[in-house]
Amino acid sequence: MLLNEAVKIERSEFIGAQPRERTAERKCHANGFKPKCLSTRLGKLDLQIPQVRGGEGFYPSAL
């Protein structure tokens, strides 16, 4: 859960606005989530990777 929340915060910073917030600095829009399974030495983590629409180059730095 912690990693999912961290990537949501990172997406908001990349976009330049919080969810449903209208600002002049907004670069693009949130566009849902994509499921991803990350294998670690402690086991598998099921993540929800946030997607953006209209902005190129967003990928969470934690991954």
Image (tube, grey):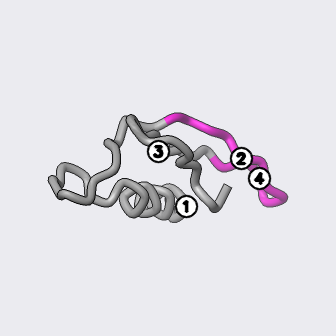
Do residues under tags 4 and 2 come within 8 Å of each other at their CB atoms?
no
Type of secondary structure dominating the magenta stretch: strand
Would you say 21 lies left or right of 54 here?
left
Which residue position is annotated with label 4? 43
Do residues under tags 1 and 3 come within 8 Å of each other at their CB atoms?
no
Residue at the far left in the pictured view: 22
In the rendered structure, which disc, 4 or 1, sits on the residue that comes first in sequence? Answer: 1
Magenta stretch?
34-45
**Residue in the image at 61% along x and 44% along y:** 46
Distance from label 3 to label 2 (Cα)?
Answer: 15 Å
Q: Which mark is residue 38?
A: 2
Q: Is residue 25 above or below residue 53?
A: below
Q: Amino acid at mark 4?
A: Gly
Q: Amino acid at mark 1?
A: Leu
Distance from label 4 to label 3 (Cα)?
Answer: 22 Å
Image quadrant occupied by the C terminus: bottom right
Q: Position of residue 19 (x, y in %)?
A: 25, 52
In the rendered structure, which disc, 3 or 2, sits on the residue that comes first in sequence? Answer: 2
Q: Position of residue 50 (x, y in %)?
A: 46, 44
Do residues under tags 4 and 3 come within 8 Å of each other at their CB atoms?
no
Which residue position is annotated with label 3? 50
Mark 4 or mark 3, whichever is nearer to me: 3
Distance from label 1 to label 2 (Cα)?
Answer: 11 Å
Distance from label 4 to label 1 (Cα)?
Answer: 15 Å
Circle 3 residues within 10 Å: few <14, some 14–19, many ≥20: many
Mark 3 element type: strand
Which residue position is annotated with label 1? 3
**Residue in the image at 84% along x and 58% along y:** 41
In the rendered structure, which disc, 4 or 2, sits on the residue that comes first in sequence? Answer: 2
Q: Which mark is residue 14?
A: none
